[in-house]
Image: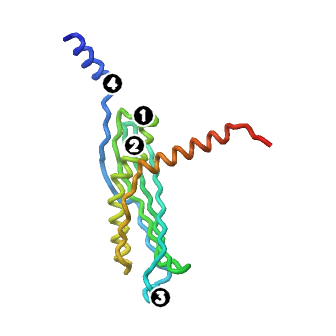
């Protein structure tokens, strides 16, 4: 019994420790445009809002540090006129050790953006208010769901290419 426990302990120690930790959060870029002002302020405020999300990650050194950038672009239009356009690139440096392959890609595409999102949301809300517009409260985002959808789409497209063409 003691030998089994010692063996299990040895096996656990042989596996590399997994580590995922936030090192720093910062704003990489902020852009705000209100091309229709001041006339837009005289119109009834019932905008059509479009939100685009994008993430990208890069390994920045050999110590397991990665930069993850969450880009959110929000466009508000009244009729066909752009009331405002705001883009925020919220970035973070994360140390990720002992996680590789698909698990690493998942962490970079889901866990890191989930941490960055509240900061980007606050920046968007703040800049819109400073631009003279009502507050913008973006709904929470399920990055796990988005990642799973993107993976399923990628696999479906990959399978489509492998199938022989029929005429």
Q: Which residue is mark 4?
A: 15
Horizontal relation, residue 119 to residue 30: left or right: left
For the residues labelled 4 and 2, the Cα–Cα distance comes to 19 Å
Horizontal relation, residue 68 to residue 118: left or right: right
- Mark 3 residue crowding within 10 angstroms, few (<14) / some (14–19) / many (20+): few
For the residues labelled 1 and 4, the Cα–Cα distance comes to 13 Å
Q: Quadrant of the C terminus?
A: top right
Is 32 drawn above or below residue 20 in the view shown? Answer: below
Single out the residue that lies furthest toward the right. 167
Single out the residue that lies furthest toward the front. 167
For the residues labelled 2 and 1, the Cα–Cα distance comes to 10 Å
The disc placed on residue 107 is 2
Going from N to C along the chain, the mark reached first, 4 or 3, is: 4
For mark 1, give the secondary structure.
loop
Q: Which residue is mark 1?
A: 100
Q: Residue at x 57, y 41 (%)?
A: 155
Going from N to C along the chain, the mark reached first, 3 or 2, is: 3
Going from N to C along the chain, the mark reached first, 4 or 2, is: 4
Q: Position of residue 58 (x, y in %)?
A: 45, 46
CB-based contact (under 8 Å), mark 4 and mark 2 = no
Residue 10 or residue 92, whichever sits in front? 10
Going from N to C along the chain, the mark reached first, 2 or 1, is: 1
Q: Quadrant of the N terminus?
A: top left
């Amino acid at each position: 019994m003691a030998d089994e426990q010692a063996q299990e302990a040895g096996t656990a120690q042989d596996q590399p420790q997994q580590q995922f930790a936030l090192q720093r959060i910062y704003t990489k870029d902020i852009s705000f445009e209100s091309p229709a002002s001041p006339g837009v302020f005289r119109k009834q405020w019932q905008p059509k809002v479009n939100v685009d999300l994008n993430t990208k990650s890069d390994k920045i050194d050999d110590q397991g540090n990665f930069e993850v950038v969450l880009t959110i672009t929000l466009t508000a239009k009244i009729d066909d006129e752009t009331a405002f356009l705001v883009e925020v690139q919220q970035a973070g440096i994360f140390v990720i050790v002992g996680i590789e392959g698909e698990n690493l890609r998942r962490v970079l595409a889901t866990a890191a953006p989930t941490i960055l999102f509240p900061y980007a949301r606050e920046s968007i809300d703040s800049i819109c208010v400073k631009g003279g517009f009502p507050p913008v409260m973006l709904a929470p985002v399920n990055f796990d769901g988005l990642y799973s959808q993107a993976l399923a789409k990628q696999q479906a497209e990959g399978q489509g290419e492998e199938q022989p063409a029929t005429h």
